[in-house]
């Protein structure tokens, strides 16, 4: 990536570069310049027709200058009739590819991937978007549940159409110049809804045992891989656990990773946790489990490293170079950072130089809970909008 300043002719003071500075060659052949990844953050900056414009180009150039090796876009919608938010980017057969080419070019020499997503039931009531889901189970977020409509169970036709939409979006992302796509199967969106026994109550081939609940994800990954070139990256974002009693848990994650490995074609899997109903990354998992203060999922997701058939990336609560190095030392191949890189886009250059470069955690005077989480998320979004100006 383009460094913000002239590189020191003797970087790291002559010492060996830290492990986070090492490049990583993925199974598809895509080479990531270093181990730091700007994790997906919904930017809420789409212009007319769901197209990216100069604001998104400026935002990603800021991260590119900051030295991060790989950037994931915020979730890009695969279906313009089903949007998580009305200002999300949409990439489908009706999109003009020129603005996507300009966006993909913001990465300089770094690796820029598009995260592709379908929100399923997580669409706002009255937004005009269709709320589709495996079953008619509405989002339960206490007093805020009224924001979300009861979803319509998907027909076999809806499911097949959705698989095709992911494949089309991936093909267009490749044509636009992205290095790869990441299929979003975490945080309670459509693919995670199918994986969850709490949301998926189907009795057909897409419901019941985990193998059936994982069918949609596996079909999407296979369809995407079949549609793009062998040298184009395909990744998945998966929860290590949903942190809900009776929900998708660590053993489920282990089995899904195994099936993704058997199917082949996946370059890396990012492990995260929680959902709109269980704010694990905001320190409020619904099952009240205690998580680490930093690198929240390190202990739990660390149990998946030994058997993983492809490189793993860990995201959640990483704000310091030393913690990033600890994540790599535990066997993860990539370190995902969202909030801290929004606050300090130049943090990667410092971490890559071997500094701790701690970025303060976001603060709020509100007590822990959904409102606090929403306030922190809104402050990060506002920061993205500042960077985009
Ligand atoms: C403003 C904001 C928007 C986000 N949007 C997305 C998204 O579009 N897709 C996604 O997978 N995760 C999204 N996330 C979650 C992050 O990718 C990440 O998993 C989470 O914030 C934990 O990492 P962090 O502690 O480094 O922020 C978002 C997070 C924030 C703060």
Image (cartoon, rainbow, N blue to C red):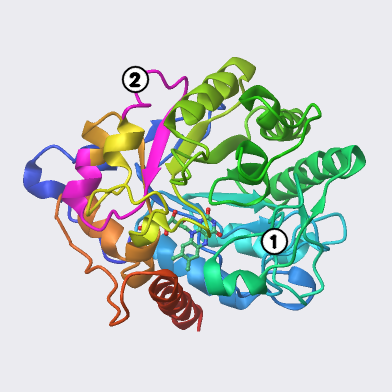
Picture layout, residue 257 above or below residue 241: above
The kind of secondary structure element at disc 2 is loop
Q: Mark 1 points at which residue?
A: 100
| Residue 325 lies within the magenta run | yes
User: Does residue 259 lie above or below 158 as drawn?
Assistant: above
Judge the density around disc 2: few (<14), some (14-19), many (≥20) Cα neighbours within 10 Å: few
| Residue 27 in view of the camera | no
- At a point 55% along the width and 26% down the height, the residue shown is 256
Q: In which quarter of the image is residue 221?
A: top right
Image quadrant of residue 57?
Answer: bottom right
Q: In this view, does 83 lie above or below 160?
A: below
Residue 81: image x %, image y %?
A: 83, 63
Question: Secondary structure beneath disc 1?
Answer: helix
Nearest to N terminus: mark 1 or mark 2: 1
At horizontal 29% and vertical 40% (from top left) the residue drawn is 298
Specify whether 273 is left or right of 320. right
Residue behind label 2 places its C-beta within 8 angstroms of ligand 1: no
Label 1: few (<14), some (14–19) or many (≥20) C-alpha neighbours in 10 Å = many
Residue 146 in view in this figure: yes
The quarter of the image holding the N terminus is bottom left
To which residue does mark 2 refer?
306
Look at the image and give the residue range highlighted in magenta. 303-326
Instruction: Please state if 108 lies on the left or on the right of 76 as rendered.
Output: left
Q: Distance between the residues labelled 1 and 2?
A: 38 Å
The residue at the point 8 percent across, 43 percent down is 14
């Amino acid at each position: 990536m383009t460094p913000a300043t002239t590189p020191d002719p003797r970087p790291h003071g002559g010492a060996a570069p830290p492990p986070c500075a090492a490049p990583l060659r993925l199974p598809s052949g895509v080479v990531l310049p270093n181990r730091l990844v700007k994790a997906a953050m919904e930017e809420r900056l789409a212009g007319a027709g769901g197209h990216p414009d100069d604001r998104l180009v400026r935002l990603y150039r800021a991260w590119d200058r900051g030295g991060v090796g790989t950037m994931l876009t915020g979730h890009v919608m695969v279906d313009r009739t089903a949007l998580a938010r009305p200002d999300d980017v949409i990439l489908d057969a009706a999109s003009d590819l020129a603005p996507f080419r300009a966006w993909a070019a913001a990465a300089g020499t770094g690796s820029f991937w598009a995260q592709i997503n379908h929100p399923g039931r997580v669409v706002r009531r009255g937004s005009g978007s269709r709320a589709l889901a495996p079953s008619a189970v509405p989002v339960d977020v206490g007093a805020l549940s009224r924001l979300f409509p009861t979803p319509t169970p998907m027909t076999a036709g809806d499911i097949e159409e959705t698989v095709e939409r992911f494949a089309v979006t991936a093909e267009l992302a490749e044509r636009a110049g992205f290095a790869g796509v990441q299929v979003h199967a975490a945080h309670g969106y459509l693919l995670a809804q199918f994986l969850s026994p709490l949301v998926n109550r189907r009795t057909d081939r897409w419901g019941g045992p985990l193998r059936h609940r994982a069918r949609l994800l596996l079909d999407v990954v296979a369809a995407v891989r079949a549609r793009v070139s062998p040298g184009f990256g395909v990744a998945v974002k998966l929860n290590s656990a949903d942190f809900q009693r009776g929900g998708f848990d660590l053993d489920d994650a282990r089995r899904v990773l195994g099936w993704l490995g058997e199917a082949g074609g996946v370059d890396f899997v990012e492990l995260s946790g929680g959902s709109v109903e269980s704010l694990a990354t905001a320190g409020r998992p619904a099952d009240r489990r205690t998580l680490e203060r930093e690198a929240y999922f390190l202990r739990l997701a660390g149990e998946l490293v030994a058997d993983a058939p492809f490189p793993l990336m860990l995201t959640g609560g990483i704000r310091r170079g030393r913690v990033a190095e600890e994540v790599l030392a535990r066997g993860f191949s990539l370190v995902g950072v969202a909030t801290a890189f929004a606050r300090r886009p130049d943090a990667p250059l410092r971490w890559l130089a071997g500094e701790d470069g701690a970025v303060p955690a976001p603060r709020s005077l509100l007590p822990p809970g959904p409102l606090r989480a929403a306030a922190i998320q809104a402050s990060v979004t506002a920061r993205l909008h500042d960077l985009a100006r």
